[in-house]
Image: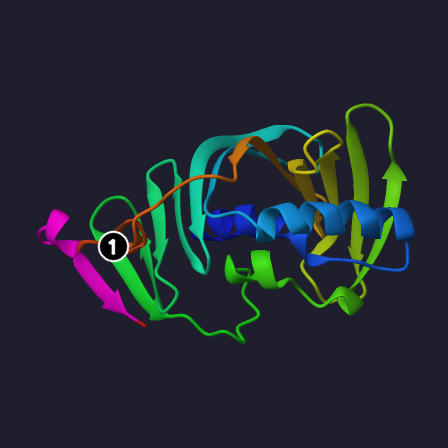
Amino acid sequence: MMKKLFLVLFMFSFCTAFSQNNTSAENILDKSSAKIKSAKGINVSFSLTQKDKQNQVVSNSKGIMKMKGDKYYINQDGSEIYCNGLQIWNFDGQDEVTVAKVYKDDNEFSPPQILTGFNKKDFNIKLVSSAGNNYQVLLTPLDKRQNFKEITLYINKSTSLISKASVVSKMNDTIEINFNSISLNASFDDSQFVFDAKKHPGIDIINN
């Protein structure tokens, strides 16, 4: 479940992270990036669908994400991630929470990368369609050791924000994320990004 939570952030991050030789794709992503980076606080609701290689639905889930600078909170079907920029808490929604430090140079998909971006040299980026209400941008990793083959982003033409994303793994299964709403004017207290163990008496705390 935690990998799926980070995947939501990974998908969302692509709308702020990349530019490449394709001028149209670069302009689209840069415009979206500017809106995200200027946001005071970001509040997102999303739905996630996992499909197998026969395109049959395996699972569905819904969640919310809150961001403020390098701080974030995610709740997906009861599982939660808290991060205050220094520490990260992974709460299973029941009786266990894992605590770890945030490493700025970690390659794990994480919310700080939403604003700072990934290395654009690691991907080929192509605008594959501008039909309808969304731009469709295809991203393929240059490093074939990655566990996914391609990412497709759908960027809303009127808002310049990501509306949908999908990732195809090397096993040919697919995870689709629909960003149902994105608010860029949210206001959050810093306490919302810290796990409060006092609210969960008897919880098992695991320090990594």
Q: How many marks?
A: 1
Q: Which residue appears farthest toward the top when viewing the image?
A: 132
Q: Give above or below for 199 relative to 58.
A: below
In the image, residue 143 lies in the stretch drawn in magenta: no
Residue drawn 68% across the image and 40% down it: 166
Residue 25: horizontal and vertical position, in percent?
A: 84, 48
Is residue 143 shown to the viewer in this render? no
Q: Is residue 21 left or right of residue 179?
A: right
Q: Position of residue 100 (x, y in %)?
A: 34, 69
Q: Quadrant of residue 55?
A: top right
Which one is in front, 74 or 70? 70
* Residue 111 coordinates in the image, percent (x, y): 51, 57
> SS for tag 1?
loop
- What amino acid is found at the position of numbered circle 1 in the picture? Phe
- Identify which residue, 108 or 55, lies in the foreground: 108
Please determine whether, in this image, residue 92 is positioned above or below residue 131.
Answer: below
Whether residue 113 can be seen here: yes
Q: Residues within 10 Å of mark 1 (few under 14, many from 20)?
A: many
- Name the residue carrying label 1: 195
Q: Quadrant of residue 123?
A: bottom right
* Quadrant assignment, res 65: top left
Quadrant including the C terminus = bottom left
Residue 204 falls inside the magenta stretch = yes
**Camera-side residue: 143 or 53?**
143
Q: Which residues are magenta?
A: 197-207
